[in-house]
Image (cartoon, rainbow, N blue to C red):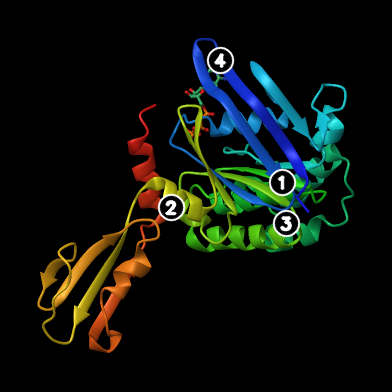
Amino acid sequence: MSKEAYIVLKNISKTFKQMQALKEVDLSLYAGECVGLVGHNGAGKSTLIKLILGLIQPTEGSIQLFNQDFSLKNASELRRQIGYLPETVALHGALTGEETLNFYARLKGVPLEDNLSLLARVGIAQAANRRVGTYSKGMRQRLALAQALLGEPKVLLFDEPTTGLDPASRQMFYDIVGELKAKGTTILLSTHALAELEGYADRIVVMKNGVKLADGTLKTLQSQSGLPERIEVKFKSATNLPSHWEKIGENAYSTQSLGDQKITLLKELGDLDLLASLDIYTPSLDEMYMHMLKREDI
Ligand SMILES: Nc1ncnc2c1ncn2[C@@H]1O[C@H](COP(=O)(O)OP(=O)(O)OP(=O)(O)O)[C@@H](O)[C@H]1O
């Protein structure tokens, strides 16, 4: 059975005065998937998220949320099912963490009684009664995350959520992403740090200058990037290999493998008992991403 599309953007363009921030973008987010939205500064990531939230209107194209057209009439009802963690979080320094969360809970119309456990979930229960003005950046970000999780929304939009976080806070954030995914929440997460998404994102959308360059699983992206894997072998004694194996040391060779060439290349090695070592290097996510952005001349 195919999954339900919670959010469907069709042929979306957005122009700010002379500046075209998005060009004919199609994007669907399905129930329970985590989608990474990556792109350099100005690629259009925040604009895309703001359009989904209804904070700005598209110049062209249509947006459907939960199978309904996103008109002003039903906007607030639909928006209640979406949690948003903005890139820059403005929190009132004079309020305590708990007061802040209570304030947002009232705005969203959700009960207040779970707020302390929500603060515990994001690791700042001990600071619930402290003024936010005394919080570190990491603590503020955790509080902002708690705000986004209020009311258990079906869809969460995270705009560069881990920027400026230390490794422990970042890990806590991705632990929560893992839990949300397991519960079937749909997550759209924009980031510059593609490598962070490994193991969490089911799909990656790559944006450049307002255009969607790629949309697929990491495996698809890897084959689309056109970057080869590298195989390195070392034999226990001298041997001969076909000329596409480059000699890189004593009895050691290296070659590149594109697409499904790997098995054929490995067969050329013959008896594996004659090998001292065998290493296969797959391009990292960041290498693929950089390569893809460089290759596309937009
Ligand atoms: N309100 C606005 N008025 C004018 N131009 C805007 C506005 N909002 C965004 N833009 C422009 O649209 C383009 C896309 O911006 P956007 O913030 O969506 O990029 P981004 O991918 O989120 O970048 P970053 O990683 O730097 O946050 C940029 O060139 C930006 O200057």
The three-letter code of the residue at mark 1 reads Tyr
Examine the rendered structure and indicate whether residue 184 appears above or below residue 190.
below
Q: Quadrant of the N terminus?
A: bottom right
Report how far apart the C-alphas of labels 1 and 4 lie in the structure.
Answer: 29 Å
Q: Which is more foreground, mark 3 or mark 1? A: 1
At label 3, counting other C-alpha atoms closer than 10 Å, the crowd grade (few under 14, some 14-19, many 20 or more) is some
Which quadrant of the figure has residue 17? top right
State the residue position of label 2.
Answer: 222
Q: Residue at x 67, y 21 (%)?
A: 61
Front-lying residue, 178 or 230? 230
- Ligand 1 has an atom within 8 Å of the beta carbon of the residue at disc 4: yes
Q: Secondary structure at mark 3?
A: loop
Q: Which is more foreground, mark 2 or mark 4? A: 2
State the residue position of label 3.
Answer: 128
Q: In this image, 120 relative to 217: left or right?
A: right
Question: Residue 30 got which mark?
Answer: 1
Q: Secondary structure at mark 1?
A: strand
Q: Secondary structure at mark 4?
A: strand
- Report x, y in % for residue 28: 67, 39
